[in-house]
Amino acid sequence: MKLKTLDNFSFAEKKVLLRIDINSPVVNKKVLDSPRFKESAETIKELSNKGARIIILAHQGRKGKSDFLPLNQHAKLISRYTNKKVQYIDDLFNLKSIEKINSLKNGEIILLKNVREFEDEINIKLKNNRYKNFCKNFDIYVNDAFSVSHRVQGSIILPPKYLKSCMGRGFEKELSALKNFHLKNSKKVAFLLGGSKAEDYLSLFTILKNKKNKIFASGVFANLMLVAKGYDLGYETKWLKEQGYNSLIPKLKKLCKKYKEQIILPIDFAVNGIEPEKAKDRIVKNIEDFPINQKIWDVDKNTANLFKENLKGMDSIFMKGPLGYSEIPQFSNSTIDILKFLSNLSRKKNTFTLLGGGHLSTTIQKYHISNTFPHISTSGGALIAYLSGKKLPGIVALEKSAQPKRIRKF
């Protein structure tokens, strides 16, 4: 079913519940600027200019992680990109936010508390989930968070059950670009998978049934695969266990054995202590040097060269996540090197290259890498799920909302 867009509704004097994704890299508790702010600003400005009263929901990080922060910094960044005042309200379901929502004037914008502070967000089946009553305060729901629409979470799934709903401009743009990327149309496909969300990647191993396809691993994902192959990385092995990643190792062990010729893993690394912000230099270690009592923050040039050599001749390349901790300049080398290599391939029209994930968008912007890519998605896990052929729960929720008489009564 065709999803509704902003063109399908009149927004003047309407209270609009808008879900966006402005989850961004964090260094020393400072939220870094991200292309997600610019992308979200397009929908926000349009709604405001049409006279909507805009109430924004968003998240930052996950509970228990160092990047789990309130959204006051985000409100300032949204204000910068929209050139409109965005007030942060440190509340969501309670009287403080409800009073502010009801007092909004046409065109005004508020950003509410990090939705991941609440069990109502994480568990949509929670008894007396507060989203149902919360939705009574609004006229229309807009999902402009394609990048979290693979999550079965409150702010994505529940509002479309009770409100007229549509997708925002960023969501619309993502779907338009991705419908042109089909794995079946390519004879040789490469997936460069980095970052920390290793569990999202398991569904992609089906591409390796085609013996010409390859997966290149880096970051937490690569370290897990090395441990699954029997390597002891020292501090990194212990860290992975502490972070709860070990549950993935049995599956990865089977995959490594089944597709060993098609999985390309790092052979050298940049390390330095256990806190990247305090590390001034790159200390390079080969895989044979492990175990060591230092954390891995990047792969080094031999790995980057190995990747580049194996990427030559591929028809389509999908890259998600940086190869290292690219927020810190001394650990950005490999990510910059590979992005420049892929940009050159794209410029020559030899390869269709698709980039995904907010961290890569930030890296391209921060280090002024030539942007010749056909499409740079700010999505990560949602993009992977979509490319794997899965139906995103957020899309299903919007489709059901678009069907006649499917909106439930409060």
Image (tube, rainbow, N blue to C red):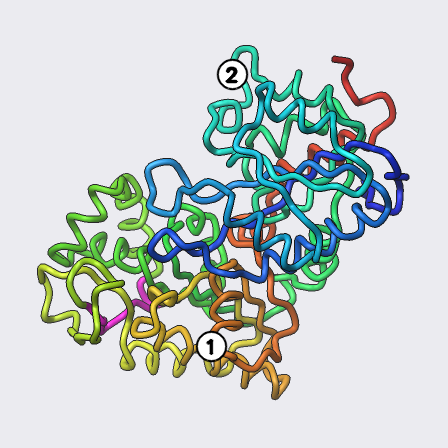
Camera-side residue: 121 or 226? 121
Camera-side residue: 210 or 47? 47
Mark 2 is surrounded, within 10 Å at the Cα level, by few (under 14), some (14 to 19) or many (20 or more) other residues, namely few
Mark 1 is surrounded, within 10 Å at the Cα level, by few (under 14), some (14 to 19) or many (20 or more) other residues, namely few
Tell me the residue that label 2 is attached to: 126
Q: Kindly identify the amino acid type of the residue bearing the numbered disc 1.
A: Tyr
Tell me the residue that label 1 is attached to: 367
- Quarter of image, res 283: bottom left
Q: Secondary structure at mark 2?
A: loop
Residue stretch in magenta: 260-271
Q: Give x and y (percent) for residue 124.
A: 55, 23
Q: Give x and y (percent) for residue 63.
A: 38, 36
Q: Residue at image x 66%, y 63%?
A: 181
- Relative vertical location of residue 200 with respect to residue 364 in this rendering, above or below: above
Residue contact between numbered discs 1 and 2, judged by CB atoms under 8 Å: no
- Residue occupying the far bottom of the picture: 348
- Quarter of image, res 112: top right
Q: Secondary structure at mark 1?
A: loop
Q: Residue at image x 71%, y 34%?
A: 17
Of callouts 1 and 2, which one flags the residue occurring earlier in the amino acid sequence?
2
**241 horizontally vs 92: left or right:** left
Q: Give x and y (percent) for residue 162.
A: 74, 22
Inspect the magenta stretch and tell me whether residue 265 lies in it.
Answer: yes
